[in-house]
Amino acid sequence: MQLITLTTDWGQKDWYCGKIKGLLYSSVKDVEVIDISHNVPKFDLNSAAFVVKNACLNFPENTIHIIDVNTYETQKKAFIAVKYNKQFYICTDNGLPSMVFENGEIEITDFTNVFADSNYYNFATQDIFVKVAALIAKDLSADNLGNRKEKLEVESSFPRAVIRKDSIICNVIYIDDYGNCYLNCDDVTFDKVLNERSFEIMLDLGCYIRDISHSYADKAIRGQILMTVSSSGFLELAIREDNLAKLMGLETGSQVVIKMQDKKDGSFFGM
């Protein structure tokens, strides 16, 4: 069975997802279409890349992934098929692929305008991506779909945490549907900077985090805030049985500072 996944910012209100599924089931033999997410925040490439990295890379070889977030028909942003780790990703060269694959070994095929058969294009997945997915599914190859490219044209990356000896200045890079906030710092980096010291995070409303939890259940009382290591490997801020982002006014891009303790006097740097 051919697996095809969909990751989009379409939402659930409109007909877009239903139409694309109908086209895929009509044009690809023995296919299963899998929804990764249709609730990526509108035009948010960072969130889309985070979702793709944490979901799509785990599928078996020959899976085809269609990614439609901030996708426009324009000469400045090529439509591409990327082969990575024996899987295919149909998307736009708009910065998202460079965040997903980083320095991984990839093969890129540019199919911009190859499948154009109309003067009007405002739904790239319907107009073009479905056709490309059907052709890849037929031959399990993107070699004959367009022109090979040596590299991605648009380079982008997740915001990097600022590492100092006395602190880590992080940003929220993703907020899930529970309101849990993922920071751009992984557990290895955190442990290295911490170096067996104590740490402190101060959030709004005078709330502090001074320990790391192994699970949400470490906090026994509803409404207690915590930091843990998420399944993605990044630090995660959460609150027991509530929405941390909404409660603390955190958004994608919000800054979170982790302060380290001064071993000499026990105070926290910057206090």
Image (tube, rainbow, N blue to C red):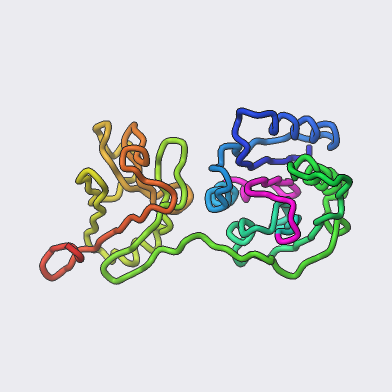
Q: Nearer the viewer, residue 207 or 251?
A: 251
The magenta segment is: 55-76
Residue 42 forms part of the magenta stretch = no
Q: Nearer the viewer, residue 33 or 95?
A: 95
* 153 lies left or right of 173: right
Q: Is residue 219 above or below residue 198?
A: above
Residue 125: percent from left, percent from top? 74, 43
Q: Residue at x 26, y 53 (%)?
A: 201
Where residue 42 sits in the image (x, y, percent)? 56, 43
Taking the spot 27% from the left edge, 34% from the top edge, the residue there is 223
Q: Is residue 232 left or right of residue 265?
A: right
Q: Position of residue 192 (x, y in %)?
A: 34, 66
Q: Is residue 195 above or below residue 257?
A: below
Classify residue 24 by image quadrant.
top right
Q: In the drawing, does residue 188 fall left or right of residue 124?
A: left
> Looking at the picture, does residue 99 appear above or below residue 20?
below
Report the number of discs.
0
Residue 195, quarter of the rendered image:
bottom left
Say which quadrant the N terminus sits in.
Answer: top right
From the viewer's perspective, tell me whether residue 97 is left or right of residue 253: right
The residue drawn where x is 48% and y is 50% is 232
Residue extending farthest left: 265
Task: In this rendered view, identify the residue nearer to me: 125 or 32.
Answer: 125
Q: Residue at x 77, y 40 (%)?
A: 126
Q: Residue 247, percent across and down?
A: 32, 38
- The correct choice, above or below, for 179 with respect to 72 in the image is above
Which quadrant of the figure contains the C terminus?
A: bottom left
